[in-house]
Image (spheres, rainbow, N blue to C red):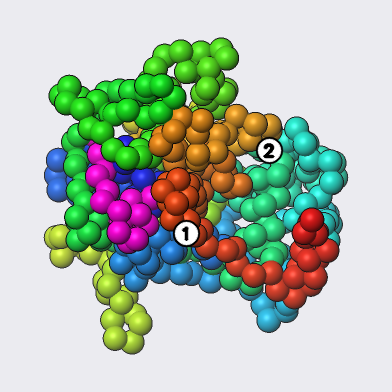
Amino acid sequence: MIGGGLAGLASAVALAEVGLKVRLFEKRPHLGGRATSYTLPDGSEVDNCQHVTLGCCTNLMDFYRRAGADGKIRFYDRLHFADRQGRRSTIEASALPPPLHMAPSFACFGALGVADRLGIARALAAIARAGGQPPDLAGVSMLDWLHRMRQTPGAIERFWRVVLVSALDEELARTDARYGIDVFWKAFLGNRDGYRVGIPSVPLAELYEGCREAIAQRGGEVKLRCGIREIRVREGRFECAVLEDGSEVSADACIAAVPHDVLLGLLPKEMGEDGGLFAGLRHIRTSPITGVHLWFDHTVMTEPFLTLLDHTTQWIFNKSLLYARAGANGATSDQAKPGTGEQGQYLQLVISASYDLVPRSRQEIIDLCRHELEDVLPATRGARLEKATVIKEVRATFSPEPGVDRWRPLQETALKNLFLAGDWTRTGWPATMEGAVRSGYLAAEAVLAGFGRPQKFLQPDLPFEGLSKFWAKEKEVPAS
């Protein structure tokens, strides 16, 4: 197993559970890949970017269960939004059956005008009635589809863009409409629990502690700070992996769970050139995410998280509150600085598709974010910023551009005993943690099928409910 991100870990844990001896190699000093945390020189533990799950992410939650981390995810039923004037709006499910369960919240969404809401209702109804599969989407961007649905500028900027850029890490004009529509169909329309936000109550690296144990208990091994220099191929099959120290590791099967651009650097050069087996990977582009970490001297925010409208900053996560331990009556403890006992508050801000921030300096980004916080969190105006850091993931995810699926490979390759895992492989999902885990499970299934031991790990989606169940059934393809 090459790579200890979510895709590699999902494959490794699943295969170890069925008795295979797994050796996992990760070049970093920690597991989790791009969805992990690490310690700053002053001892603060920070996530490289805040990652969340949704109720519709069934495979990610299954992975957390296998890793013994499902109890470290807290789910929230209310989504809080704030506009430039600091006005709050909330989205939550009502008692109505799907897809109508969100309608009362949308109707009362104060940041949207009447024309905005009517347009959004029309587009969401079109998605639902089509069972999540509106016609004529091939090669169409999400922005083009929204224009086709006559969405107002306010609806696009204050609703569609807010949700989708965060979910897909790409601007609407660069996003395949099918992925954007899938987000709303699976998270907001199909099942009343699909939209619920699950946020880790611990630093991300702690979610993967059980993975190493699960692999080791079954005779496997996890090696950190152990990078791979080369994947050798001979006579159409995987031969061995060459470590950075020059030693070779052979195996009955190899799963390469690394980013697509990294994979091209490991395989024989000709395989990535025109006409090569993996030439399509060169057409997959990437998108950046920027995380901004701010420590204030006193409490400035009461919500666990907040989504911003009309700002560069998209999400604010109240890490002090999210990490606080719940008391016996469900109340959270005082918001203290982790490890100090002193009163203060730690916030993490997230900006997806942050192309404009990549060339900007750390201080420019911090100043921009502080200015935007004053709009929605007035208490920050009088608070002292004790420290701050900025983490740029310039190549955080693959870009879900229109037509990108034709370049995404299956987990089983034409090379015997070489398999692929990663959110960029063909999973039916965009670049999400759910997609990464799905790819890992699919790769594990392919390995076992090659050994003549077929087994399923992939979990089904949430069942459709209410009218959505009826419309989804109408779109089912009859068995041949």
Q: Secondary structure at mark 2?
A: loop
Residue 232 highlighted magenta (yes or no): no
Which residue is found at the position 22% from the left and 59% from the top? 218
Which residue is found at the position 40% from the left and 36% from the top? 417
Question: Residue 455, which numbered label?
Answer: 1
In which quadrant of the rendered image does the N terminus lie? Answer: top left
Q: Quadrant of residue 125?
A: bottom right
Visible residue check, residue 246: yes
Question: Residue 176, which numbered label?
Answer: 2
Looking at this view, is 60 or 126 the one in front? 60
Residue 223's spot in the image, x, y percent? Answer: 19, 42
Residue 18 highlighted magenta (yes or no): yes
Measured along the vertical axis of the image, is residue 186 above or below residue 411?
Answer: below
Q: Residues within 10 Å of mark 1 (few under 14, many from 20)?
A: few
Q: Is residue 258 left or right of residue 88?
A: left
Q: For the residue marked with disc 2, what is the amino acid?
A: Asp
Measured along the vertical axis of the image, is residue 418 above or below residue 474?
Answer: above
Measured along the vertical axis of the image, is residue 68 above or below residue 328?
Answer: above
Residue 184's spot in the image, x, y percent? Answer: 67, 56
Q: Which residues are magenta?
A: 11-27
